[in-house]
Structures are given as C-alpha cells and as structure tokens.
C-alpha cells in the first residue's frame, strides 16, 4: 500500500523532520498498532538524502519512548555477500547483552537454531534453509514476548539476500505479531538483489511512504535553523533550493560549507552554490578532503574502507596512526558533522567522545552513506584494494569471523595467496552452514580468481557448483563442466557427472547432461575401482533416470537401457537402492506390476538416509507405493515429513508434502490433502522469492491441489491453481476433469483429455493409476455420440488397470464401462463389481462415487431399499471426506429414492477447514498453543483465532472436549 504525503507539517523542532508531519504520523500509528499486537511494516522509499534515515531515527526514538524493544541494522554496499549480515546486526546485540535466563527464553523452541545462524562455530552442522528462516522468526516472536519489537533497517537496497529472504518470510506473518518493521531503501539503487528486493518491497504488508523534496519555504527554514542566523535572504535560499532540488542532505552539506567558510547568506553570495547541482555531496566532500592533512586523509580513507561502526582502534591501525592522532583526525575531518559515533544497540554500550568507559570499543561511522561513498570512490582503486587486504588481516586478528574477513577479500586484488583461498573457503562453509549457498558461491568465485593451488582447483570448482546448483543452474553446470575437463581420474569425473545430472533435474535438461552421465558411466565400467566405484555407477545410473524423468532427454533409449540397469541394481549399497527407486518409478509409469516390490526393496534396510541428494529417490519410491495402494506408504511419508521439519530443508519439505498430498487425496482425506498441497506450494513460492528454480515439483503439487479443490467443489479456485504453463501429462488430466465437472462442451473435454493421452504416450506413461485421461475422454466422446470409440478407450483402461493390479484404477474403469453399457442389467453388474473391487481400496472417494452410481442405477431398476442403503453409505463417506459435489449428488439421489438425507455439516468436524483441522488435532493431542504454532509454522495468535472458530463449529467451550468432538 502506498501512502501519499498529506499536508506538510513538522512534528518537532528538528530541522531533519521539516515537512515530514504526515510520514511521522504514519510511523507513530504503525508503532501504536504493533503495541496492540497488530504487526505493521512501513517502507520509506526515495532518493539518497531525501530524509529516510531521519524518519527511521524518529521511529526508533518513538519506539524506545513507548517502551518497545528497538533492534537496528544498516546494510552496507561492502557487506552484500555477508550471509544474514542485516539479521545479525538486528539480533546479535540482543543475545550478547542477555542474561543466561533471558538468552534461554529468547532461544526457546524452534528459535534455538537461530543461535547457530547468528553465532556459527567452525564445525557447525548445516542448517536447512527453511530451518534458518523459521528459527529467526521464532527468535523475533520470543523477543516480542514481554515488549513490542521494532525492527529498524536502513539502506535495505544493500541488504544481503539471506536477510531479504527472512524479511520475505516474516512479512506474511507480521500482522499477528507485536512487531513493527520499519525499513528505508533508495528508489534509485537496487544493489545486487534487485528481483528479491523488489519482491520484498512490493509485499502488500508494507505501507510505502515516499518523502518529497522540501519546498522553498521549508528550505529557507531549514537553512535558518541549521545556520542559526535568523532569516536567510530569499535569493540565497532560492539558489540553495535550485542547486539541491530540495534534498535535505544536500542542503545540510551546503549549510555546513557556508558555516565553515563563514559565507554571508545574502543575494551577492548566492552564486556560490549555483554550480553544485546533484553532485553537491561529492564535490563538497572532495573540497573538504583536499584541505585535510595526510594523516587525516588516510584516516578518512580507512574509515570508508572499514564501513559502518568500525572500531576506532581498527581505523587508526589501518591508517597507520596512533590512538591520540586518530582522535585529532576525527576532529579535523569533522566530528560530529561528517563522522559520528556508531549506533547504540540493545545490549551493547558504546562509549562517548572521550574514548569510553571500558565496557566496549568506541565505534565510528560517516553520518550518511553518500559521504562514505564519496570518500571511498575518491581513493584510487589500487589503494582501495590494498586497504581491503590489510583490513581483512585486521579483522582476522581481532574477531576471526570468516564472513567479515571475506567481505574485505572480495574487494582485494588477487595475489595467488593460498591463505586467502583458505579464508574464502572458510567463509563459504559458514554461509552454507546457515542455509545461504548463494553467498557461499560469491566467496568461492573470488577464491577461484585468487587463484588456488592447482591441486585445489577441481575441489574448489565442485564446492562452487554445489553452492550454486539451486540458484544459478547455468553457472553451476559451467563450473562442473570445467571441473570435468580438469579432473584426472574416472571416479572423480563420475562424481562431477553425478552433480551435473542433479543440476539437470532442476531445469529442463539438454542432451548434454545425459551425454556427460553416459561418458562417466562408461569410464567407471572401464575402471576397476572396487565397491565405491560400483556404488557410484549405481548412483550415476539413477541420476540418468531422474534426468530422463525431468525432460525428454534420453527417454527414447530407456526401454533399451532398462535390462542393463536392472542387472546393475542387483548390487548392495545405497547407490543400488537409489537406482531401485528410479527403476521402480519408471516401471510404475509403464504399469509393470512388480514396481511396488522394487520400491519396497529400495526403502528396506535404511541404506538410503534422508538428505537433499536422496530426497528425489525417496519421494519417487513412496509415490510408487501410493500408486500401488500399499498401506505402509503413508506412515513412511509421515515419518519422512517429521524428519523434513526437523531438518528444516525446503527442498525435502516441498517434495515430501507434495507426495503426501497425493496420498491423502487418494485416501479421500481432502482437508489434509489440501493442507499438504498448499504447504508444498508455499515451499515452492519461498524458492521463487529466493530466486530459486523448480520445474517438475511445481506442476506436480499444482495438479494435486487442483484435483483436491475439484473434489471439494471449489471449481474457481481449482481453475486458478491449474492455470499457467506446465507439462500436459501432469496438469492436463486435472484440467480435463475440471471441464467435465463444470459441464463444459464435450468437444473441449475430449480435446483436452486426448491431448493428455498424446503427451503421456510420448513419454511412455501408460499406467492409468498415474495419468487418468481415458475416462474423461470416453465420457466426453460418448456425449458426442462416439460411443464405440469411447468403449475402446475404457476397455484399454481396464486392461491396463488390471495389469497394474491396484484396485482404484480398476474400479474407475468399471464405473466408466457401466456409464457406456447399452443395457441396464449390464451396467448394474459392472457397478456391483466396481464397488466390490473398491471395497479393498484405500481410495474411499472412488468407492463412494461407485456406490453413488450403483445406488442411482438400483433406484432406476426399482430396487429402492437396496438403493437407499448403498446411497447412505456413499453420503456418509462423501460428507466425511468433504467432497461437496459428490455429497450433493448423492443427496439428490436419496431424495429421488424417497429418503430424507441429512443436511451437510455446518458444524461438527466436517465443517472444519484444513488449517482448523490440523490445529484441532494437535491441540486435542495435548499440544499447547505455542507448540501448535511451532509445529505448523504459524504464530500463536493464529492458533488462538483458529481455536475460537473450532470451538464454535464443534459446539464446545474447553480444550479438554476437543478429542471427543473430533471423533464426532
């Protein structure tokens, strides 16, 4: 939401807030709302120097005055590759200043992982990307437990991407927290995170304020107050206003120059400012710098290189001067006009001008990034690079923080120093450990430029590719191919090829990926590398199949390859079991009945541990078991989902929730299926916000969600979900079924369904349990009078379904044959068989649909009593599953049969939404509101709102009644 400025006003005598009354009032309102528990977000947007930082300071001061806990951060251009740099600025001082008891409270629950994000040790375990985001959210929730929280972030346009991702994660949840987020960003600067920054800045949770330049009258008042000279001649004011376009920072710098030179402010001296224009700050800083002595110039350059809140002692050391000289330089440069003391943060004491009270180092910063930038760019490039390398050594000696060291090494000139390579790799390891692989890739790129010793080049390329693989596929593939050309042995080349194949599964791969894999497999076959090489061959073969599943590359050769792959999978080890997963999925696509047994073997023995590298194999094997209606599939998926939540990996969470959504859909657990599908979709969207790419996963979860919504009767929402690009064999089936349910023209239904069949056939997907297109096509063709063609399709469907062996596709095909049967008795027999087959199926809604058809046919045959019995059973299932269209059809059939069916549930368990049902189940099991919130990744306030609605729908008043009420 963008808010235009109202009538100009001044909230105080502070000249920095002239004509900022409207903006200050919006900020005051946001702070008041957060104090009431209604979180808000305000973005101050405008050109450099327009007054954003002054408004941010107003928000900070007002927040502190109101008793809020204020956490501050300012992003800098030098630290954009510093993973979670802004988040660390916000929360590190809070934890550092906390007592042991307070620290334990701040890190309670999921927030415990935040400690590893903010204070990672040298041997820290890798944190999943979702776990990092969620833990930081809960740290904010805990910090706001006893007082409202104000997060003030300046210069958001330079914010590091992981911190931006966390803000994107926070914003949709902000309204239910006592937290105010106030950020400032330049409208004319996007840094290196343009798309991600734009996604955050345009989030609907933000109220956007765009301060306007000062008018001429306000500029005169500003100059008068700043110069403390009373009235300023209108001609001089006009000249200053024209030169600065009403920009407050430029006006302040002009006023300072006027004061330093004791320049009269009359019409005769107005020409002094006419030539300054937009580059006033840089010109004024350059003039001021030229008047400084050599030591003060070195001090100014050192501070510009070290950046915000640099310890005064470090600035002095980098400038090559002593402490006393540093204090004199500070005065010479202009304290506090050009340089001021660093920010005081929660939990940290910053000493004053005289050097401090021993409780913390004195820190200094330029008063505005434009001034620092002007000083920084005035330093020759070679000198800047030299200073950054020296600054890295200083930071290494003082803190040893790899990320802060590497932030300087990024700007230092390459010298072939092995220690620099080691430091950059250490910084990359830390970024990877906190779930920021993209930032790790930046450090590893720089390490390659150093360059590393020859023996380290291939390992470094592999590290870089693994860091970049989820975000810059083309770049990762390029590094891997370079490594492939450089690698010496076949085993090393095979590992690289496996990573290339994994990269190919993220996007539509080319034939090159398959060729690389084939070459690597051939090289391993020539190499007698023992068991490790054999296991690697199996992994490579599995990756080849995964690559083929994700595109058309190599699919044509699959039938010829399969015998050799089956022989290879007879080995022992995790690679062979991963290959079993891939073969089982391929066999399920073609309808081989032994696919499920192979999937069970793949999952037996615990050889395949859950990881980002194995989740595709695990998900495909469990998908096969679901298609076979194996009762053990859902418990395995539940355990895998619990593991995914513990790990906090978005990739694992997205994959598992997508497969489990399909399993719950098959079982008629529509509310839970929708919840899982939306969770998978949310995970995919978090990937998109982070700039990551998904290809197959997105369409698969959209198809599951579309089918679920269709069965729930939410046709418009289903159409919205299914809209957009995606493979026809994944999205075409749900679209055809949606057309059929809506009563669209049969020709359109037939066209869409037959197109699905064509696409599936080209990919070799024959199993009707996988892609359901023949039944909707047949029903549409029958409606057009093409009944013989329709019967042929359904007969083929039934033959393939019987070959696969699972009950659900057989039952569906028998129902369709009944609809096409020329005689009533024939239809009845087919429907009785369908119901009988489905009685042993996990597909409850398919059974209910068959019962609905059978009940209707029985009533038409004059068998009313049997019809009513069958229809009541169908209605019970449809209502319990939340399948509204089916329930209404059965009710109509019952009324036609002379019965009085019960009404649909407006109360009771059937009336709960998917989200309400999950909250109710956890609360009934004894979880507190806070634990429920942590498990479902929502806020405690959301849990409270859900519970109030749940109590009303269930007709209860206490938590202890939940379990009985849910049982109905």
Image: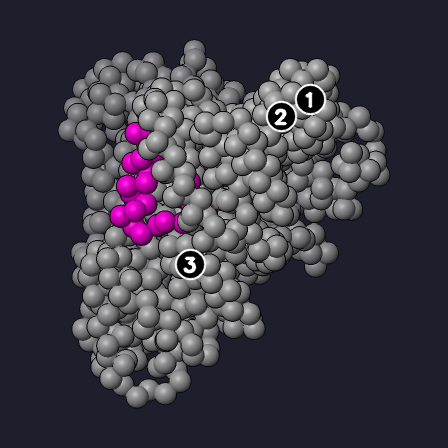
Which secondary structure, mark 1?
helix
Labels 1 & 2 near each other (Cβ < 8 A)? yes
Q: Residue 647 appears in which quarter of the rendering?
A: bottom right
- Precedes in sequence: disc 2 or disc 3: 3
Seen in the picture, residue 77 relative to 236 is either above or below; the reply is: below
State the residue position of label 2. Answer: 858
Q: In the current view of this chain or complex, which residue is farthest to the top? A: 7
Residue 772 included in the magenta stretch of the image = yes
The residues tagged by marks 2 and 3 sit, at their Cα atoms, a distance apart of 36 Å
Q: Nearer the viewer, residue 3 or 242?
A: 3
Which marked residue is nearer to the observer: mark 3 or mark 1?
Answer: 1
Q: Which residues are magenta?
A: 748-774
- Precedes in sequence: disc 1 or disc 2: 2
- What numbered label is drawn on residue 864? 1
Is the residue marked by circle 2 packed among few (<14), some (14-19), or many (20+) residues within 10 Å? Answer: many
Labels 2 & 3 near each other (Cβ < 8 A)? no
- Precedes in sequence: disc 3 or disc 1: 3
Q: Residue at x 20, y 50 (%)?
A: 378
The residues tagged by marks 3 and 1 sit, at their Cα atoms, a distance apart of 42 Å
């Amino acid at each position: 939401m963008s808010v235009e400025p109202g009538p100009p006003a001044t909230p105080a005598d502070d000249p920095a807030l002239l004509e900022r009354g409207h903006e200050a009032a919006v900020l005051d309102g946001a702070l008041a709302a957060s104090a009431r528990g209604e979180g808000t977000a305000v973005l101050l947007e405008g050109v450099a120097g327009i007054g954003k930082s002054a408004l941010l300071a107003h928000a900070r001061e007002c927040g502190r005055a109101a008793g809020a806990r204020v956490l501050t951060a300012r992003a800098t251009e030098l630290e954009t590759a510093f993973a979670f740099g802004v988040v660390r600025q916000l929360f590190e001082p809070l934890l550092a200043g906390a007592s042991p008891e307070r620290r334990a409270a701040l890190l309670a629950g999921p927030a415990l992982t935040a400690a590893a994000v903010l204070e990672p040790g040298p041997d820290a375990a890798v944190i999943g990307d979702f776990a990092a985001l969620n833990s930081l959210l809960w740290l904010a929730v805990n910090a706001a437990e006893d007082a409202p929280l104000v997060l003030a972030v300046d210069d958001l346009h330079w914010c590091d991407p992981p911190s931006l991702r966390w803000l994107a994660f926070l914003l949709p949840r902000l309204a239910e927290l006592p937290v105010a987020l106030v950020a400032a960003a330049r409208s004319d600067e996007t840094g290196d995170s343009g798309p991600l920054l734009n996604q955050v800045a345009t989030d609907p949770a933000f109220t956007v304020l765009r301060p306007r330049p000062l008018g001429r009258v306000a500029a005169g008042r500003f100059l008068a107050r700043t110069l403390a000279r009373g009235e300023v001649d209108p001609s001089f004011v006009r000249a200053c206003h024209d030169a600065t376009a009403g920009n407050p920072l430029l006006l302040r710098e002009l006023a300072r120059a006027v004061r330093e030179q004791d320049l009269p402010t009359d019409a005769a001296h107005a020409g002094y400012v006419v030539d300054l224009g937009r580059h006033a700050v840089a010109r004024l800083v350059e003039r001021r710098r030229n008047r400084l002595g050599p030591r003060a110039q070195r001090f100014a350059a050192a501070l510009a290189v070290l950046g915000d809140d640099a310890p005064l002692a470090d600035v002095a050391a980098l400038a090559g001067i002593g402490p006393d000289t540093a204090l004199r330089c500070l005065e010479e440069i202009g304290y506090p006009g050009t340089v001021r003391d660093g920010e005081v943060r929660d939990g940290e004491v910053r000493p004053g001008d005289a050097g401090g009270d021993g409780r913390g180092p004195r820190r200094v910063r330029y008063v505005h990034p434009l001034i620092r930038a002007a000083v920084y760019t005035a330093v020759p490039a070679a000198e800047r690079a030299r200073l950054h390398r020296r600054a890295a050594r200083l930071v290494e000696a003082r803190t040893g923080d790899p990320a802060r060291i590497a932030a300087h090494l990024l700007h230092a000139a390459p010298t072939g120093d092995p220690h620099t390579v080691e430091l950059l790799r250490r910084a990359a390891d830390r970024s990877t450990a906190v779930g920021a692989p993209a930032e790790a890739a930046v450090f590893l790129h720089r390490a390659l430029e150093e360059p590393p010793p020859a023996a380290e080049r291939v390992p470094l390329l592999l590290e870089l590719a693994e860091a970049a693989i989820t975000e810059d596929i083309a770049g990762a593939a390029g590094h891997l191919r370079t490594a492939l050309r450089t690698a010496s042995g076949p085993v090393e080349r095979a590992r690289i090829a496996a990573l290339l194949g994994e990269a190919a599964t993220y996007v539509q791969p080319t034939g090159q990926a398959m060729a690389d894999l084939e070459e690597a497999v051939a090289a391993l076959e020539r190499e007698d590398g023992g068991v490790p090489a054999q296991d690697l061959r199996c992994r490579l073969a599995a990756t080849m199949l995964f690559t083929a599943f994700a595109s058309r590359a190599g699919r044509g050769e699959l039938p010829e390859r399969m015998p050799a792959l089956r022989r290879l999978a007879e080995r022992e080890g995790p690679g062979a079991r991963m290959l079993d997963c891939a073969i089982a999925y391929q066999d399920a696509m073609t309808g081989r009945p032994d696919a499920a047994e192979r999937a069970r073997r793949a999952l037996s023995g615990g050889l395949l541990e859950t990881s980002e590298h194995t989740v595709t194999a695990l998900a495909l094997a469990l998908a096969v078991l679901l298609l076979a209606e194996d009762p053990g599939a859902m418990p395995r998926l539940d355990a895998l989902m619990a593991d995914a939540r513990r790990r906090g990996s978005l990739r694992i969470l997205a994959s598992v929730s997508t497969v489990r959504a399909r399993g719950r859909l098959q079982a008629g657990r529509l509310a839970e299926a929708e919840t899982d599908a939306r969770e998978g979709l949310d995970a995919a969207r978090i990937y998109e916000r982070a700039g990551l790419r998904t290809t197959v996963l997105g369409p698969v979860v959209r198809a599951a969600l579309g089918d679920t919504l269709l069965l729930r009767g939410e046709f418009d929402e289903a159409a919205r979900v299914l809209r957009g690009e995606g493979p026809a064999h994944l999205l075409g089936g749900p679209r055809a079924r949606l057309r059929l349910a809506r009563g669209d023209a049969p020709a359109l239904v037939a066209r869409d369904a037959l197109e699905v069949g064509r696409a599936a056939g080209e990919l070799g997907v024959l199993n009707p349990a996988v892609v359901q297109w023949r039944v909707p096509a047949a029903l549409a063709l029958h409606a057009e009078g093409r009944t013989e063609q329709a019967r042929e399709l359904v007969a083929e469907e039934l033959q393939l379904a019987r070959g696969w062996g699972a009950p659900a596709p057989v039952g569906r095909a028998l129902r369709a044959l009944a609809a096409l049967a020329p005689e009533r008795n024939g239809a009845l027999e087919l429907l009785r068989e369908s119901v009988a087959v489905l009685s042993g199926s996990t597909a409850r809604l398919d059974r209910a649909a068959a019962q609905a058809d059978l009940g209707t046919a029985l009533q038409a045959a004059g068998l009313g009593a049997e019809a009513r019995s069958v229809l009541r059973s169908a209605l019970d299932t449809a209502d319990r599953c939340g399948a509204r269209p089916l329930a209404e059809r059965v009710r109509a059939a019952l009324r036609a049969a002379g019965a009085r069916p019960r009404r649909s549930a407006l109360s009771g368990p059937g009336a709960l939404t998917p989200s309400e049902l999950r909250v109710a189940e956890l609360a009934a099991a004894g979880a507190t509101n806070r634990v429920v919130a942590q498990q479902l990744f929502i806020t405690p306030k959301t849990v409270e709102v859900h519970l109030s609605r749940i109590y009303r729908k269930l007709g209860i008043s206490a938590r202890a009644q939940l379990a009985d009420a849910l049982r109905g």
